[in-house]
Amino acid sequence: MKTNIRNIAGVLAIIGALNWGLIALARFDLVAEIFGMEFGETNAATRIIYGLVGIAGVLLAATLFMPDHSAEMEPIHTHRDADTYSR
């Protein structure tokens, strides 16, 4: 569950980063454009998207230095290991 939330937050953060890059380089707000708004204009839908991107950034910042326990798995036992334990 934590991994899914982090993945969603990662996707939202990427969307936000790309949008800010477009704003900086081309003065083009993709989120506003998708919702039929001009550059710099907002409505409820764009504010929701911007809010979700902000929450994703906070979540990722808060978990940035937390250990990733998803890589900790049970060791794989080979056939040779099985012989050692059965004797």
Image: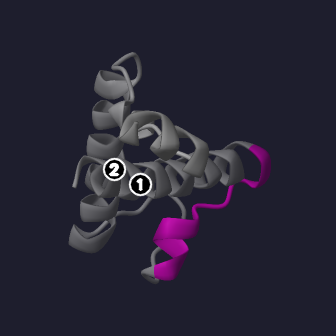
Q: Which residue is mark 1?
A: 7
Q: Residue furthest front?
A: 87
Residue in the picture at 78% in, 46% down: 25
Q: Which residue is mark 2?
A: 3
The answer, for residue 86, to whether it is visible in the render is: yes
Q: Describe the colour scheme in one phrase.
A: one colour
Q: Give the dominant element type of the magenta stretch: helix, strand or loop.
A: helix
Q: Nearer the viewer, mark 1 or mark 2?
A: 2
Q: What number of labels is visible? A: 2
Given residues 46 and 77, the one toward you in this image is 77
Point out residue 28 in the picture as x, y percentages from the top left corner.
66, 61
Q: Are marks 1 and 2 in contact (CB under 8 Å)?
A: yes
The residue type indicated by label 1 comes to Asn
Point out residue 31 in the picture as x, y percentages from the top left corner.
49, 67
How packed is label 2: few (under 14 Cα within 10 Å), some, or many (20 or more)? Answer: few
In this picture, is 65 found above or below 73? Answer: above
Q: Residue furthest right?
A: 25
Residue numbers of the magenta segment: 25-34
Image quarter hosting the N terminus: bottom left
* Residue 63 relative to residue 71: left or right: left
* Residue 7 relative to residue 4: left or right: right
* Residue 58 relative to residue 11: left or right: left
Image quarter hosting the C terminus: top left
Q: Give the Cα distance between marks 1 and 2.
A: 6 Å
The residue type indicated by label 2 comes to Thr
Say if the magenta span includes residue 39.
no
The answer, for residue 76, to whether it is visible in the render is: no
Residue in the picture at 41% in, 63% down: 41
Point out residue 75 in the picture as x, y percentages from the top left corner.
45, 37
Given residues 36 and 14, the one toward you in this image is 14
Secondary element type, mark 1? helix
Point out residue 83 in the picture as x, y percentages from the top left corner.
50, 43
